Amino acid sequence: MFATRHVLLGALLVLLGSATLSAQQRPATTSPRLEQERQRWNRSLTRDTAYKFNRQPNALLMEVAKGRKPGKALDVGMGQGRNTLFLARQGWDVTGVDIADEAVAEAQAEAKRQNLRINAVVSPMESFTYGTNRYDLVAFVYEGCFEGQPEVLANIRKALKPGGVLVFEFFHREAGIEMNRPDFGCLSGAVQSLFANDAGFKILRYEEKMGIPDFRSGSNKYNRPMKLVYCVVQKQ
């Protein structure tokens, strides 16, 4: 799930309780481009057998969340809900947001099977209502580098409570070059620079190192060591 699937378009917001969205419910779209994005990611996340996404939670998120008292959390780009469901199992009051309504429906169905309560919102990340001082943790895992997404980053900054943390993981630009995608991935220091000179945030962890991307499962071109960016920042 990369940043290219999200568009700066009008919002559709479908706020759900526990296991209430059916796969047949589809968001009303405001443009052909938004509809194309929705269909693309529904297909990739729920129907493309060659493009299976991991059902296990992200390792960095697990490490950070398990060391903190459960509170309110937001999973941006929840997909089928691997990180949303993990947080719910750990006792977090968690909201997930994604444009792919069918993937969100799968997450809701799995939450029901596990007797978990999650809040799921069908929306582009740019249109989601983040609120102010609302979340103790925000996960932004394999959703991009915030390049071309200044409003998303600004909303996340505002939405975190003082003491709340942002958990970030994505590809380094060197990984993009290895995949013959020279404009893909985060430049060295780019994410760090977003917070390094901001007195309102403290960088708790920042690493650019080799790792295995964990957003997909099985044998695939991503399932090998490549350079990744890991970042955890705390709002002061």
Image (cartoon, rainbow, N blue to C red):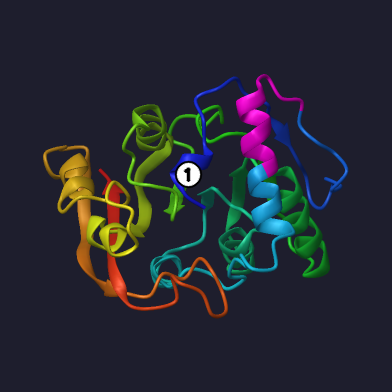
Instruction: Give the residue number, with chain letter if any, for mark 1.
Output: 135
Left or right: residue 170 compared with residue 43: left
Residue 96: x percent and y percent? 61, 48
Left or right: residue 224 compared with residue 210: right
In-front residue for pair 193/42: 42
Question: Residue at image x 20%, y 53%?
Answer: 203
Question: Residue at image x 55%, y 27%?
Answer: 127
Above or below, comparing residue 218 to residue 55 in the picture: below
Label the magenta part by its dominant secondary structure: helix
Question: Residue at image x 29%, y 46%?
Answer: 183
Question: Is disc 1 surrounded by few (<14), some (14 to 19) or many (20+) residues within 10 Å?
Answer: many
- Magenta residues span 28-39
Q: Total label count? A: 1
State yes or no: residue 33 in magenta: yes
Above or below, comparing residue 14 to residue 207 in the picture: above
- Quadrant position of the C terminus in the picture: top left
State yes or no: residue 30 in magenta: yes
Residue 111: x percent and y percent? 75, 62
Above or below, comparing residue 20 to residue 86 in the picture: above
Residue type at tag 1: Tyr
Q: Taking the image as drawn, is residue 122 in sight? A: no
Residue 165: x percent and y percent? 36, 52
Residue at the limit of the structure toward the left, as seen here: 197
In-front residue for pair 48/171: 48
In-front residue for pair 55/19: 55
Choose top left, top right, bottom left or bottom right for residue 55.
bottom right
Left or right: residue 46 compared with residue 156: right
Above or below, comparing residue 226 to residue 15 in the picture: below
Q: Taking the image as drawn, is residue 62 in sight? A: yes
Question: Residue at image x 76%, y 41%?
Answer: 16
Left or right: residue 7 compared with residue 205: right
